[in-house]
Image (cartoon, rainbow, N blue to C red):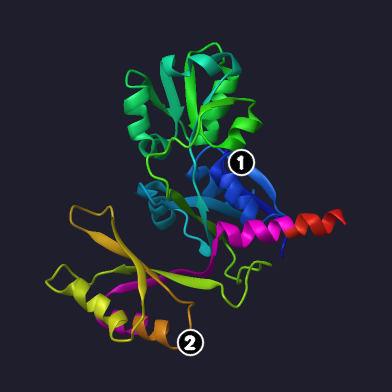
Amino acid sequence: MNVGKVGYLGPMGSFTEAAAKALVPNDERIPFRSIPDTMDAVKEGLVTRAVVPMENAIEGSVNITLDYFIHHQRMNMAAEIVAPIEQHLLVAPSRMSSWDKVETVYSHPHAIAQCHHFLRKYLPNAEISYTNSTAAAAKYIQENQSENAAAIANDIAAEAYQLKMPQMKINDYENNQTRFLLLTNDEAPFDSDGITEETEYKTTLMITLASDYSGALHQVLSAFSWRRINLSKIESRPTKTGLGNYFFIIDVAMKKDDILIPAVCEELKALGCGVQVLGSYPCFSWEDLTGVTKKMIEKEAT
């Protein structure tokens, strides 16, 4: 595996850092304060690749990631990992017994939304204050322990910033997962010890319809359907050129090949559609890579 520097949405202790460690365990990890900053760092040569959150099972797509990728920093989607997400309430040690009296709760907007029911039930009067990441919220609590406040973040952040967890697993739904993508300038295939014969692949396409006419999207989907190509996701996003103008992001549940996907692209182009391949990449579960990382650490220790 190539060794380099990987940027992630920081600070230390974020879910994105954990995903970066799982995907590229040998890379030096460099935190950035926002998703755009993380992606810019690749183009500016500060890091060789970046890991960013793309989609959450509860809250859906992370729009800032997708929009910034499409409109400002186009790169190659090189790999994906789906990580389990557990949110906890974090407080300074002195507030462990009075956590239900905190006046402000800090966290990322998605984390706040994932814990909506908990906040309504136990902290209905607390003011909500948004941060760039869950780890940034935890860091703020550590640096401002005199403030009667709490953060929503993970156990890694709690340990990193010496905070207590009076309430654990406060997310509203148990099956909370986030999909993270590894982005690179390089189109070379991702190299990982975690890739096996059973590893699933995904190809992501961006498609712009030729014109707004009845049945246009149906024609696009038919190009995949009659070839029996399975789509794992289809999503529309505004082109930012006017109301009603959209492009479509389509995830195809297969590796880019020499026949089927190129044929689809040519058929869509013949219909007048704009087609771009954003990446064709391996998809890992958390267990796929954390097990490999553990084995690497044990091997190095011996």
- Residue assigned mark 2: 258
Task: Identify which residue, 71 or 298, lies in the foreground.
Answer: 298
- Residue assigned mark 1: 31
Badge 2 element: loop
How many numbered markers are drawn? Answer: 2
> What residue do we see at 60% from left, 72% from top?
189
> What residue do we see at 18% from left, 52% from top?
243
Q: Amino acid at mark 2?
A: Asp
The answer to whether 231 appears left or right of 152 in the picture is left
Q: Amino acid at mark 1?
A: Pro
Q: Which residues are magenta?
A: 265-294
Taking the magenta stretch, the answer to whether it contains residue 268 is: yes
The answer to whether 157 appears left or right of 225 in the picture is right
Above or below, 198 against 10 in this view is below
> What residue do we see at 55% from left, 18% from top?
96
Question: Do the numbered discs 2 and 1 sit on residues whose CB atoms are within 8 Å?
Answer: no
Above or below, 258 against 132 in this view is below
Could you classify mark 1 by the number of other residues whose Cα lies within 10 Å: few (under 14), some (14-19), or many (20 or more)? Answer: some
Residue 134 lies, in percent from the top left, at 50, 35
> What residue do we see at 48% from left, 22% from top?
150
Instruction: Evaluate whether residue 44 shows in this view.
Output: no
Quadrant in which the N terminus is drawn:
bottom right
Q: What is the number of the mark on residue 86?
A: none
Residue 103 lies, in percent from the top left, at 41, 15
Residue 114 lies, in percent from the top left, at 38, 39
N-term mark: 2 or 1? 1
Instruction: Evaluate whether residue 221 shows in this view.
Output: yes
